Image (cartoon, rainbow, N blue to C red):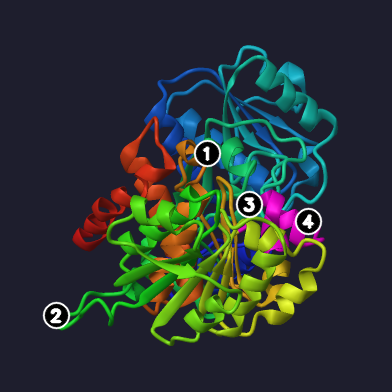
């Protein structure tokens, strides 16, 4: 991915971007002015003048706070500043902007909140690596207890910018950050703690990306829309690919929804392979989706040996046991684009190595947290766990949730942020697996196909709104595709 529009920068990468910006000719004092000014601007845009207290820390985040305080005061707002530690300990640009502040300055404590209506949290930024403690933790907790309006600079203090972990943060209604978002702005609980998020332009040149190479991005069509399968004038159903779903019994709805989603995502043909016992159930419920009977244990192997099947999916409703295990290994031996979901993952919980060793072709796994834990003995934050799992398994990992993370085996990662809470309904994950299947069946590269599917899934749910059922999702895809094509 070369488009850096939605790049997410770690705290270390953001520090390097700032260093390169200064090296390009914007001095650190001006850069800090550019960072603090948007905080005051965004506050003035949303609220009428009221008593404000700006809580400043001992580093550059506190320097941004001094700029915001001065700018608000110049605009006629009643402002006080409370500083963590002595003013003499400030260095560099932060000391310069603290010296420009001519208003009240007091020690950072709960008493500093008295008489204020709006709190600017400029204590610590995204680089914090330890739990919030002492007067900083106590003062922010008191502000939250009083239900004061809190605006955060960069991140709410106590939120880790690289992981989204909460080490003492309180919720802000608005967070103003600079240049690019950080992973912690999107990963939970960070996304919830940030409230409304504004990314301000502080003059950082695009040339910083000649040196800073991002490997994490926010999911957005700009990353993959050009790779979406395009309809050709001379296309036919065979040239658009043939998707094969291994259907389960007696739980049949999951595979049927997945197959319908694959067809709606553009697969030219879609077939469900099922046992002869289940054939009447599937055949009666499907029209444009074909059904192929499996009379013997070898029939699936014969089926997948047909090279016309360009995308394979197993898991939804498959059941956990030896039959599913054998079917997964049969599909993986075909070395075609394969999507593994639900029971196809859980059935290997006692022998994950057998699954990982069998992955020799393009593969996408779509576990939720429970399925992930059964398969991977990995600790840490969500992004690092998904990266480790992708590297270990050799598959693209789609670790689902409201902050779904999509990671390629080479470490590239995309964090999704468009999933509405209505997707928390039975079967929505089966539909997601089907959308991935539909895209890879048409030849889309698995990592981008997975990212596109996750975004399309969220957009479709948003189109529908409340009272969503998973079975509604496939028929919402055409409207989303139309919107993309218009864009």
User: Residue 370 lies in magenta, yes or no?
Assistant: yes
Measured Cα–Cα span from mark 3 to mark 4: 16 Å
Residue count near mark 1 (Cα–Cα under 10 Å), binned few <14, some 14–19, many ≥20:
some
* Residue 466 occupies quadrant: top left
Vertical relation: 309 (above or below) 316: below
Measured Cα–Cα span from mark 3 to mark 2: 39 Å
- If you read the primary sequence from the N terminus, does the residue marked by circle 2 or circle 4 appear first? 2
Do the numbered discs 3 and 4 sit on residues whose CB atoms are within 8 Å? Answer: no
> Which disc is residue 233 wearing?
2
Q: Main secondary structure of the magenta part?
A: helix
Per the rendered image, the range of residues in magenta is 367-386
Q: Which one is nearer the viewer's eye here, 90 or 379? A: 379
Q: Secondary structure at mark 4?
A: loop
* Residue 238 occupies quadrant: bottom left
Is any part of residue 61 visible from this angle?
yes
Q: Secondary structure at mark 1?
A: loop
Q: Position of residue 38 (x, y in %)?
A: 46, 43
């Amino acid at each position: 991915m070369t488009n850096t529009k939605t790049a997410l920068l770690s705290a270390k990468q953001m520090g390097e971007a700032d260093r390169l910006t200064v090296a390009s000719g914007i001095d650190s004092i001006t850069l800090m002015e550019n960072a603090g000014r948007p905080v005051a601007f965004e506050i003035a845009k949303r609220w009428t003048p009221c008593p404000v207290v700006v809580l400043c820390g001992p580093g550059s985040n506190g320097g941004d706070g001094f700029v915001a305080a001065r700018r608000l005061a110049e605009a006629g707002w009643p402002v006080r500043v409370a500083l963590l530690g002595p003013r003499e300990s400030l260095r560099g640009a932060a000391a310069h902007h603290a010296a420009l502040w001519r208003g009240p300055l007091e020690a950072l404590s709960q008493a500093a909140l008295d008489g204020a209506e709006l709190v600017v949290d400029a204590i610590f930024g995204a680089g914090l690596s330890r739990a919030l403690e002492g007067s900083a933790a106590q003062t922010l907790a008191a502000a939250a207890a009083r239900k004061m309006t809190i605006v955060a600079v960069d991140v709410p203090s106590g939120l880790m910018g690289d992981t989204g972990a909460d080490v003492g943060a309180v919720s802000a209604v608005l967070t103003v950050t600079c240049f690019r978002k950080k992973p912690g702005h999107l990963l939970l609980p960070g996304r919830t703690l940030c409230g409304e998020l504004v990314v301000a332009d502080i003059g950082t040149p695009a040339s910083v990306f000649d040196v800073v190479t991002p490997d994490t991005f926010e999911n957005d069509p700009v990353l993959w829309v050009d790779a979406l399968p395009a309809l050709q004038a001379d296309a036919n159903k065979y040239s658009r690919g043939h998707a094969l779903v291994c259907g389960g019994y007696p739980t049949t709805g999951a595979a049927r929804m997945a197959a319908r989603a694959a067809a709606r995502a553009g697969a030219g043909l879609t077939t469900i392979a099922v046992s002869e016992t289940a054939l009447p159930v599937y055949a009666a419920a499907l029209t444009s989706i074909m059904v192929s009977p499996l009379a013997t244990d070898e029939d699936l192997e014969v089926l997948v040996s047909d090279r016309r099947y360009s995308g394979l999916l197993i898991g939804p409703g498959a059941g956990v046991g030896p039959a599913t295990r054998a079917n997964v290994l049969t599909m993986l031996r075909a070395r075609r684009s394969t999507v593994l979901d639900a029971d196809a993952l859980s059935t290997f919980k006692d022998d994950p190595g057998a699954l990982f060793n069998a992955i020799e072709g393009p593969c996408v796994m779509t576990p939720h947290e429970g399925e992930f834990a059964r398969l991977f003995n990995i600790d840490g934050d969500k992004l690092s766990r998904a990266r480790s799992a992708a590297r270990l398994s050799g598959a693209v990992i789609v670790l689902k949730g409201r902050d779904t993370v999509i990671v390629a085996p080479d470490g590239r990662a995309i964090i999704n942020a468009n999933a509405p809470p209505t997707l928390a309904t039975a079967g929505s994950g089966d539909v997601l697996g089907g959308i991935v299947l539909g895209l890879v069946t048409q030849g889309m590269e698995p990592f981008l196909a997975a990212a596109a599917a996750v975004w399309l899934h969220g957009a479709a749910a948003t189109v529908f709104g409340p009272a969503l059922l998973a079975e509604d999702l496939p028929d919402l895809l055409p409207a989303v595709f139309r919107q993309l094509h218009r864009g």
